[in-house]
Amino acid sequence: MFAPDFSKAMFFSNKKETKYLFFILMEDLSISDRVFPAGHIAVIAETDYLKEMQSEAQGPGRKLKFHLLEADVHIHLEVDSLRQLTEQDAGLLLAVSPSSQRFRLYLEKEALNNALQIHPGDKVIVDYKSKQLPGIVRYIGSICENPKLSGTFFGIELQVEGAVDDVCDGTFAGQRYFVCKKGCGVFVPFNKVKRRWSFGEGEQYASMGGVKTNNMAGDHPVNPGDRVAVYMEEEMKGGTVMGVMDGGSTVLVNFESGKTNGEEAKMPCRVPMDSVIKEDMLQSTGSIQRSNSRDISVDGGWSPEGLKGESMENGASRSDRFLGVKSLVQINMGNELTTGVIQWMGHIPGMKGEIAGVELDEDKGHSDGTYQGHRYFQCAPKRGIFVRAASCQPDTRFQSLAITPEGLQGLARTANRESCVVPVIVPPPRNEEAVRILQGRMRGIQGHCNSCYMDSALFSLFSSTLVLDSMLHKSTNQQFSHIQRILREEIVNPLRRDGFVDCKKVMNLRKELTQGGYCAGFTTEEKDPEEFLSVIMQQVLGLEPLLKLRSAGQKEQECYCHQVFIDKDDDLIVPTVQQLVEHSFHSNHLKLTEVPSCFIIQMPRFGKNYKMFEKIIPSLELDITDLLSDSPRECCLCGELAVQECEECFTDKLFSKTGLKQYCDTCWHQVHSHSSRRDHRPMKLDCPEGFVRTGKAMVPRERMQLFAVLCIETSHYVSFIKYGPEDHQWMFFDSMSDRHGGENGYNVPTVTPCPEVAKYVNSSAAQLIKEHPRDMEGVAKRQLCDAYMYLYENPRMAVYK
C-alpha cells in the first residue's frame, strides 16, 4: 500500500536485466591515504554477490568488490561492515549529504519510512534554506544524466510565490521534470520533506498501521468560539478561538487572549493545536487533568491559586496528581513498579473511565501503541500499555515535577525533571554509593543544544573525584562569584547528591560565560572541552595552572592540559597512554617541574575525522617519575640511583617500548660499549638536595591514577568515569543518549555501568591489534577507539593545591 512510483529513480540501465544489490557502510573505513566515513552507499551485481557468498573459499571477514557510489571507486570491503538496503531506500539516502547525516537518517528510520509514503500530488512542507514552505510533490526520481550518482530527489512546486530566490520552473541541468512557474520549483532530498495531513486523514492512515509524524487532529479539537487556555509568552492565558486552519506540519489555532488588568484584548495570534485545551474539558474534581502537561484553566481563566486546596477523589491534592501527555509516571504491575511516559490519554470503547497510553522504559508492555487494531500512539513493540489513568502515579524519582505556582511555567516549557539547587558541600560518591546515585536513565547531566562538550567535561571532573574541588571553593574575584556559585550549587552538588542536573542549570552557566565575553557561542555552538576548561579555569576562576613544564634551555611554562604531539612511529600500533606521554615529552624536550594534582592529556587527533591511532590502551596508572626534572630517578636496568639520561636510547629499537632511559655509571658504560651506541650523548642528572639513598631502598615512584576519559564520535562527546579502585569499576555517561518528544521534547541523559572495559584495559597490544572494534563488548569500543582526553589525579597533591 502507498507504494510511490520510483520507476525513474533506478540507478542503472537494465538493458541486460542486470540486478544490483545496495548496501550502506556501517563504520568508518581507512584505506591507504583515504577515509570513507560510515554512510557511504555501496553497490554490487546480484550475480557477483551470490556467487561469492556461496563460495566456501572465504570464511568470516570475507571481502567482496563493491562500487562506492559517492566516491565513485571500486574497492574490496568486508561484508560484515555493510548492511543491505532496498533499492528505494538506497535512492533516497544517496540524495542526502554529507555521509554522516545520511548514516544518522538510516539509523533513525522514521523519516525514511515516512518518505516512502509520499507520492506525486501529495501536499508537503519543505525545509528550504531555513524556511518551512508549503508545496505539492510533482516529481520523485533522479535529476542527473548518470542516475546512479544522483539518488532520488523530490521535485516540489511551492505554493508561495517569491518565497525563494531561485528561478527553477521544474527544470534541472537543462532537463525538464515537471512544469511550474519560475521561482516556484525546488528539488530536495527526502529529509527536507514532510507530508501535510488533512483533518481526519492522519487518524485514518494511522489506524491502518502507518507512521504519522504529527498528530494533527487532537482527541478534542477546538472550534471557533470555544474558550481555551494556552501557554504562551512564558505564562498561561485564557482566551477565545477565532479560527482553526491547516498549518502544514501541524494544525494552527487562531487565538485571541482575553482582557487582562483592564487592557484591551490583544490581536489574534496563531498557536499549535496541541498547546491549547478547552476550558470546559477541565473538571474541578474527579479525574486527572488532561493538559499535555502544560495547560490548566479554572473558572473560565487560568489561575495558579486554583490548584490549592482542591481534592481529587482519592484524597490527593490536585498539585500532586497533575498528569497529562508527556508526564513521567510509575505503574504498579503486580509485585513491581514500572516507569514510563504517558503518550496518549482519552476514552477507549469497552474500557471504563479515562485511559492512559503509556510508553514504558522497559520491554514489559503488550503493545506498540495499538489497541484492538487501532493505533493511539507510536512506540517500540512491548513498550506500550493501556491502563486506567487513575492507576498512574507521578514518577517518584522526579518529585520536582509536582505542579506548584512557582514551578508550573518551567514544567510547561520542558515537560521534564528539574534538578534542585544544593547550597551545602557534598563529597563525590565512590564505589557502590556512586552506582546507587548515578546509575540509570535521567541521570548525570542533561544535554541541550550542543552542550555535550560541557556536560561530559563537568561530569568527568566532578562526579566521582574531588581533585579539582578548589575550583568550587577558592577565593575568586567578586564579579565571578555568581559563576562559581552556579557551578558549585546548581551543577556539582546536585550531581553528587541526587545524581542529576537538568539542562537549564547548565544553560545558566553557558549564558554567564557568553555574556561575560569570554567566548562567543557557548549557548548555541559546538565547542571542544579544552576550550571550556581554559575559560572556566583560567579566565573566570583564576585557577593556578595544573601543569608546570620546562623545555631544554627555556623558561618554565604553565598550562592546564597537555596536547600529545609525536612523530609517526611504525612500532606504535596500539600504544598505551604511558607510551604516548613519554614520546610526546621526549619529542618536545619537556619535563615537569613539579608533581601535578591533575594531569589532563589530549590525544593526537584532530577533530572528529582524523586520529593517529585506531586504538589507544588506557594506562590506569601513569608513572611520571621519569618525566620530572630535578627528581631522583633509578637506573632502568639495575634499579640503582641513575646519574645519566640518554635521549638517543629512547628511540633505539632495542629499548623503544620500555620507557625513558636513565642509567647508573656502570650500566651506562655497559650499554654504550656497543658500537651502535658509542656516539650517544649523556645528559647528567642532578640528585635533589636532601635525598639520601640508604641501602637498597627504592627510588620513590610518582604515579597518577586515571579517573575519567572523554571520547568523541561523529561530533558528540561522551565520557567514562572510574568510580572505584577496581579495574571493572567504570561507568559510561551520555548526556543525550535518548530523547522524548521530538523537536519540542527533551534529552534523556543516561549513566550505565561498563565493567567490560576492564577486559580490554588489561589486554596486550598484540591482543588488541587483532580485536575488531565492532566485536568489542558493550561500550568498550568507544573508550579504546574514540578517546579524546584522559584525566589523571594525584590525590596526595590535591591536598596542597
Image (spheres, helix red, strand yellow):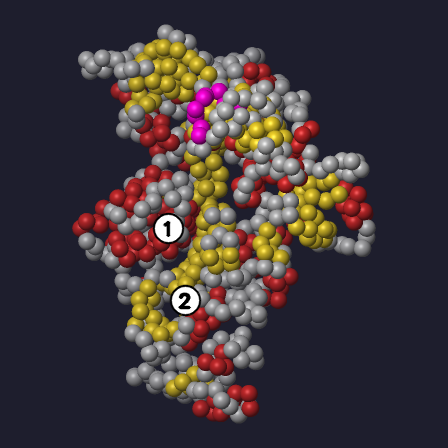
Q: Which residue is mark 2?
A: 704
Report the side of 746 relative to 234 (left or right): right
Give the camera-side residue of 761 and 194. Answer: 194
Give the camera-side residue of 775 and 470. Answer: 775
Residue displayed at 64% across by 48% down: 72
Amino acid type, mark 2: Met
Start and end of the magenta stretch? 157-165
Residue 515 is one of the magenta-drawn residues: no
Rendered-image quadrant of the N terminus:
top right
Amino acid type, mark 1: Leu
Residue 547, percent from left and from top:
33, 66
Label 1 Cα crowd, 10 Å radius (few <14 / some 14-19 / many 20+): many
Q: Is residue 56 visible?
A: yes
Report the side of 592 relative to 670 (left or right): left
Report the side of 785 relative to 434 (left or right): right
* Circle 2: element type: strand
Residue 161 is one of the magenta-drawn residues: yes
Rendered-image quadrant of the C terminus:
bottom left
Give the camera-side residue of 619 and 439. Answer: 619
Q: Taking 282 as reference, is 467 above or below it?
A: below
Residue 627, percent from left and from top:
40, 74
Residue displayed at 20% across by 14% down: 263
Residue 138, percent from left and from top:
58, 23
Main SS class of the magenta portion in the image: loop
